[in-house]
Amino acid sequence: MSHRQRRADPRRFLDLGLRTNPFVEIPPNDLSGGLPPPYRAADLLDSRWKAIQILGHCGSGKTTHLVYVGAHLSERLSPCQWHLLTSDGQRPGPHTQRPLCRPGQADGVLDLSPWTSARALLIDEAQRLDRRGRNELATWCRDDPERRLVVATHEDLRPSLERCGPILSVELGHPDLGYYQSLYDARIARARRTAGSDFPIEPEALDAALRHSSWRPRRFIVLLYFVFESIDRPGPVTLDRIEVALDEALDFLRHDPE
């Protein structure tokens, strides 16, 4: 169960001056919120890049950034296909109509024939592709000057992707305190319904949220989701509010693989 499916009565957030829980999962085609990326949208849409690599450790926000890139590309490039490779094969993403891997074949074996007309492919967990699969993707991208390839990966795939042409590689690494404060502020601003609905997070509360989420963006967002599920009035997010929601959030995270 995703944390967006476990929701308090939405009317309660209206009473708080919010449209919804600020940390609910954002739909993939919604550009109004999400992670503040370490690059400008103009860089992503620069036609000189044939391939974009989003590199980072587990929980660093790769998938969220991939969705952000995909939503921007979908506005400019049509059709734009997005595929999510997982440990047990392939799960379609929001822009997918057919699987990327051949039915019954091992993970990493590709069938790119349905996507000859696509102008962009976005692939999560791309490190799961074997060498042949990586080379097939690079060839697919290289064979048409209009095609773009965007991958999120734990492993640096530039040796394979260089066959596509110029590459933009973005390493998420470990975001700093300013990044998380910006993320928090952006989510509150996105959800705010009335001007007086302020929920500033106190420094001690932000520090506790980061400590308990191990400085991982997705865990940070999930923890604050549960914090706002328990808030009953506007005002600062204090250390006490973090601690009230902590047990439930950590229990959820223990049963929710990233």
Image: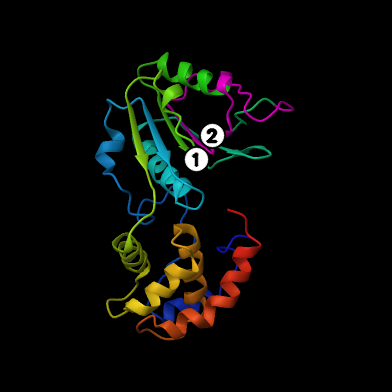
Q: Is residue 251 above or below residue 167?
A: below
Image side of residue 88 versus residue 154, left or right:
right
Image side of residue 16 versus residue 250, left or right:
left
Please report the residue visible at 42 percent of the width from the left and 40 percent of the height from the top.
55
In the picture as drawn, the residue positioned furthest to the right comes out as 104
Please report the residue visible at 58 percent of the width from the left and 33 percent of the height from the top.
128
Q: Is residue 150 above or below residue 116?
A: below
**99 drawn magenta:** no
**Secondary structure under the numbered disc 1 in the rendered image:** loop
Which residues lie in the magenta part?
103-132
Residue at the spot of label 1: 154
State the colouring used for the structure image.
rainbow
The residue carrying pointer 2 sits among few (fewer than 14), some (14 to 19) or many (20 or more) residues within 10 Å by Cα, namely: some
**Residue 50 image point, x, y percent:** 35, 25
**125 drawn magenta:** yes
Can you see residue 199?
no
Residue at the spot of label 2: 127
Please report the residue visible at 52 percent of the width from the left and 83 percent of the height from the top.
244
